[in-house]
Image (tube, grey):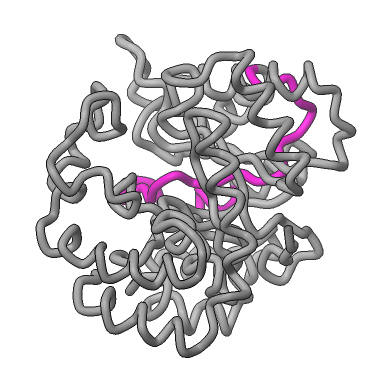
Amino acid sequence: MQYRRLGRSGLQLSELSLGSWVTYHNQVDGAAAREMLAVAMDAGVNFFDNAEAYAVGMSETVMGDAIKALKWPRLNYVVSTKFFWGLDREGDSINRKNTLNRKYLTQAIDGSLKRMGLDFIDLVYCHRPDPHTPVEETAWAMSDMISQGKALYWGTSEWSADEIRTAWNFADKHHLHKPLMEQPQYHLFHRKRVEQEYKRLIEDTGLGLTTWSPLASGLLTGKYRNGVPPGSRGALEGMGFLVQGLTDAARNAALPQLEVIAAELGCSLSQLAIAWAARNPSVSTVITGASNLQQLRDNLASAAVIPKLTPEVMARIELISSPLAT
């Protein structure tokens, strides 16, 4: 496993990391989480991604309990959480969901710290932009989390380049802690935001990227070519919004061409897709997900594929995927 600096910070993250969206609590219980975290750490992974909204807070609890049981030294791992959606419980206060106001953020970090059993969280993200809260209020509240020692770095997830720049400029002007990283979706068929929209921002501010969904929620495994199989992510309750993208005919039709390249490199289609995302030098880490140990090991084996992606191989992949990318 290789390591990369998160933006212009001194913090180093493993080029492949492990996230908990969909899986923890829903598909992975406490015992399985402990085993998977241990295997990931043994493979060199040091970054574990989470969010307040995942499994209505239970994902943080599962991960926190697993880390406590593993008794890792705190310096050996990096964890994250994200705020915006709230906990989505019936009767939640209007100021506790779909917002980035100071009141919510101030209390949200305390809730995450309690669920994860930590004194501080390394990376905290604004999970989505909030058009109803002034970005100045959000930037100041996030900076305060760091000043209070509850977090080390803050960033954004799925914000536009203009929104990030506005927050960065405000923080810079007022000598606040500036947003260091963005967590965007990035895979072979979803690329323009990372490769085009953020390009100047990355050059100007040194923004780090912790990208998610390298397998396009499973499309790039090839399992959705004939519809949505039972037990797959697309078949889970609440995941119906993914189905249209997963069963996209043109993208599924392109997979056999990518599989030819994967076979030449001695890897699977999934490993090729993960390695491709990590091949981008602007990406600090690629967040992978897994619901079982074999899937985790297969995903982490993608690290060995990254050096095989020569300019010639990347050009072949580009010809296949670029016309279908957004």
Is 172 placed above or below 66 here? Answer: below
**Residue at 48% across, 57% down:** 271
Residue at figure coordinates x 59%, y 76% from the top left: 281
Residue found farthest to the left:
249
Left or right: 311 as drawn, with respect to 326: right
Give the x, y percent position of residue 272.
46, 63
Front residue of 252 and 191:
252
Task: Say which of 145 and 47 sits in front.
Answer: 47
Above or below for 252 versus 151: below
Q: Is residue 247 visible?
A: yes
Q: How many marks?
A: 0
Residue 129 counted in the magenta span? yes
Decide if residue 214 is in sight here.
no
Residue sitting at x 34%, y 81%: 318
Which image quarter is the C terminus in?
A: bottom left
Which quadrant is the N terminus positioned in?
bottom right
Residue at coordinates 20% horizontally, 47% vertically from top-left? Answer: 246
Residue 129: percent from the left, percent from the top?
38, 51
Q: Where's residue 27, x and y in %?
A: 44, 20
Residue 202 on image: x %, y %: 55, 77
Q: Residue furthest top?
A: 91
40 in the magenta segment: no
- Residue 237 relative to residue 112: left or right: left
Specify the quadrant of the image occupied by residue 9: bottom right
**Image position of 97 (left or right of 83):** left
Q: Which residues are magenta?
A: 115-140
